[in-house]
Image (tube, helix red, strand yellow):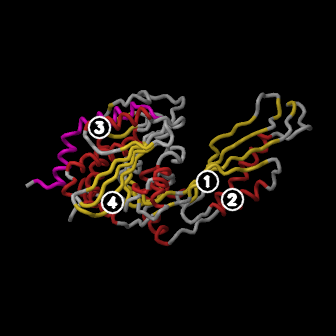
Amino acid sequence: MTSQREMLLRWIDEDRDKLVDFLSRFVQAKSPNPPGDTREATAFVTQFLDAGQLPYRVIAPQGEMPNIVGSFECGSSGRHLVLNGHIDVFPVGDEKWTYGPWSGAIANGRIYGRGVTDMKCGTTASIFTFAYLYRIREQLKGRLTLTVVSDEQTGGAWGTRYLMENHPEVHGDCLLNGEPSSRYTVRFGDRGALWLAITIQTPGAHGAHTHRSPSATKIAANIIGDLETVTSIKASAPASITQAMGAGKEALDKAYGKGASKIVEEVTLNIGIIRGGLKINMIPGKCVMEADIRLPAGVEKEQVMKEVGKILARYPEATVEEINYNPPSWCDPRGEMVKIIQANVKALEGFEPTPIMNIALCDARFWRYRNIPAYVYGPTATGGASYDEYVEIEDFLHVLKTHVLSAYDYLSPG
């Protein structure tokens, strides 16, 4: 007699071509952020949900950034699992793409295009997990909710953050997310992010009259060099997190490249934007730079701002403004969902993914901020925020199978 788990896997195998086609066309539905308009991609998803007569509603506090929330009760009472994925993707620059960034090209056993790894692959896994389990909902316990959101790339004010603050029905008891992580790791936490805008203003002058005004851009250059001191701040994370990060070093480097395991425990600095100057022979009177400072577990914003304050005290021409702040987040690295994912990956592939802290951050943090366990298991990140972004088709199908089985286990009567 075929078990429900075997039946779920059979459905996925039978739908292979349909799944690949869905993800390819999902990529073709442009949704770069900025500007953040996801209406085309949202319509693509809702058409699928409508065709399957799946329950959902659209919540759009910002018209161009709609969110989809679907939910259903199972056959008997139990726990509430939430699935989360975002629709918006990084913008496309001037990089040279082998295949068009919005082509969704299928070649070499891969699907290519902007956002296919970050994170339309994982979002597709959430959508189809919701669809497959809806078929057998009467045999499950609890509740399953799907959140397909906009605005993740710019902080979530109109996406997940908005839903968590205004629609508590999406909180649940546990979250499963498919952001890129690699099949070898399960993410249980994220570093934090502190974004600062530093403005330098001087009188400005003719480029030959350097005696009349200091240069705002030269001051900015000096400040950038001085800001490196924030990377010397030492973290003091809880022992359980430090132990898990130590055990996950090899897996983290395998997933994100050599050196990832080092910076996940450090404060890092990136100057993402510098704007200053009007003309080569004018001394700039204004320069604005935006700093992206990442905080590991065990470092508080106040520690960083104290150091920033010391630095800017030496530059009276400079002022600082906080653009955005998200503290580090984490949950139990040995939590139930981790064990469920590990067991399913071992059954599918013969190995257990390692729990890790993420070097970036994602929407899962909003659940962790409310003490709701939130875990990430997704594809390898290849070409994200760069060119020739792609996902291996087998990697995509593996992530989907893992999500379907893990959600089934969490809601299973057994």
Which is nearer the eye, 11 or 237? 11
Label 1: few (<14), some or many (≥20) within 10 Å? many
Name the residue that disc number 3 marks.
50
Kind of residue indicated by mark 1: Leu
- In the rendered structure, find residue 81 and report the number of the disc placed on it: none
Is 126 within the magenta?
no
Q: Secondary structure at mark 4?
A: strand
Name the residue that disc number 2 marks.
305
Whether residue 159 is visible to the viewer of this picture, yes or no, is yes
Are circles 4 and 3 on residues that touch, CB within 8 Å?
Answer: no
Give the percent coordinates (x, y) of residue 278.
76, 30
Give the percent coordinates (x, y) of residue 212.
91, 37
- In the rendered structure, find residue 80 and report the number of the disc placed on it: 4
| Left or right, 247 with reference to 404 | right
- Name the residue: 87% across, 30% down: 206
- Marks 4 and 2, how far apart at CA: 39 Å
- Quadrant for residue 282, please give it: top right
Which is nearer the eye, 47 or 95? 47
Kind of residue indicated by mark 2: Met
- Name the residue: 64% across, 62% down: 233
Label 4: few (<14), some or many (≥20) within 10 Å? many
